[in-house]
Structure formats: structure tokens, C-alpha cells
Amino acid sequence: EAGVAQSPRYKIIEKRQSVAFWCNPISGHATLYWYQQILGQGPKLLIQFQNNGVVDDSQLPKDRFSAERLKGVDSTLKIQPAKLEDSAVYLCASSLEGGNQETQYFGPGTRLLVL
Amino acid sequence: DQQVKQNSPSLSVQEGRISILNCDYTNSMFDYFLWYKKYPAEGPTFLISISSIKDKNEDGRFTVFLNKSAKHLSLHIVPSQPGDSAVYFCAAISGGSNYKLTFGKGTLLTVNP
């Protein structure tokens, strides 16, 4: 079974530029998550989708971050404009239904460096 | 406010000995706990979990213990192997939070041959 795919793996941009990340979850997984992991910290949930609907985006900085999952399968996360503090690894994860005691499977992440 | 705390940034053990990784939490609403393992340049992978109705769960060399009264859990790896060298994240879920994972900062385990 193929795992969660993410691209690109690495991205370097200058502050105030825009960037977009792509995620393809495990086939059949209804729930998709985007996490931000800053160096030395644990992953922090940015947004959770159930199919193509948003379940939780309470920690998403909506003035600069946006995400969509239009067809309920793959998803994109965008930052516009980027700030220095956005330098982090952006992890995508998926799970079957998003219920309790359900394993979340993570992709390899996209490492973003904002200069 | 760190709701899940891993106070040891790193731990070094000898191959064959026991590794004990600790985790404390503050939110009484957490009812499910997980450990994830992360190698460099890879995403976290699920290792083992425990429900709040249990105090122990075992899977091969890995055992997780939960002490609800102390709001403390620990992961025991016996015997430790060099391939276990990775960052270990403790995570918790509250059923009332859309099953959102809250992670600790992680502990880097190094198992020396």
C-alpha cells in the first residue's frame, strides 16, 4: 500500500514570496491533516479535513495560510506571503475516518526555509 | 502552553539495555495516548498506543505504561537496538477535540553499539 506522498521535499524562498505544498493521502482515507513542525518542537496541527470539508482550522494563521481539498482526495497548503518564522517542516497525514484510536499516517514532509 | 511535555531532549543507552522515555501531560480530557518514532528526513511513524482505561500496553520490545493519577506515561524499549535510534514523540488525543493529536517536543534516543 502506497503511503502519504508530499511534494516538494525541500523549498527555499525569500520572505514575502508565496509557496505551495501538495499532499496525496493514502487511498481511501477520508481524513487529511496538515501539521507544522518547527525545529525542536513537536508537530502542531494546522488544519484537518474530513473528505473535502474543514473539521478544524483553529490554529491556521488565516491571514497568510490557506488550504484546500477540493475533490476530497489530494490537498494543497499555501503560504502567501511567507515570513521568516514560517521556516519549518510541513507534514501531511491521513487516517481512515478521523475517529478516536485511529492511526494517523504521515508523509515525509516538506522542509521550508524562508530567507 | 505545553499540554504534553517531554522533559528530556535526549537519551543515550547501550545496546541491549532498557530505554525509558517519559512523557507528562496536563489536560485531564486526554483519553488516548500514542508514541511516534521519527527518523531524519522522514515523517513520524506510529509505534504504540494506550487508552486511558488501561495502564499498560505491550507490543514486542515496546511497552507503554500509563499512570493517570500522575498524568504520566512512559515508553520502555527492551532490549534496545541501534536501529531504535530516532526521535520519539509522545502524543495525546482528547475525544472532545475532533480527535486532534497534541504532540510533545520529542526525545532523541541514541542506542550505542
Image: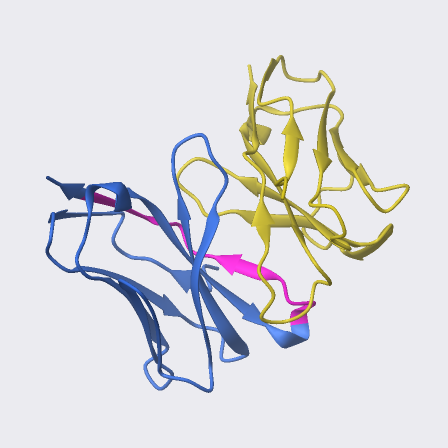
The image shows residue A32 at horizontal and vertical percentages of 72, 49
Identify the magenta region. B97-110
Compared to residue A85, the image places residue B50 above or below, namely below
Kindly indicate which chain is depicted in blue in the rendered structure: B
**In the shown orientation, is residue A95 left or right of residue B42?**
right
Say which residue appears at 55% left-offset and 68% top-offset: B93
Q: Where does the image place residue B30, in percent across and percent down from the top left?
A: 52, 75
* Colour approach in the figure: by chain
Q: Residue furthest front?
A: A1
Residue B15 falls inside the magenta stretch: no
Q: Residue at coordinates 47% horizontally, 45% vertically from top-left?
A: B44
**Residue at 72% in and 30% down:** A22
Is residue B100 rendered magenta in the image? yes
Q: Quadrant of residue B26?
A: bottom left
Hey, which residue is sitting farthest right in the picture? Answer: A71
Q: Which chain does yellow denote in the image?
A: A
Quadrant location, the N terminus of chain A: top right
Residue in the foreground of this view, choosing between A20 and B45: B45
Q: Residue A16 at what x, y percent from top left?
A: 70, 17
Left or right of A65 in this view: A87: left
Give the percent coordinates (x, y) of residue B68.
Answer: 38, 83
Residue A9 to residue B11: above or below: above
Image quadrant in which the C terminus of chain A is located: top right
On screen, residue A13 above or below A28: above
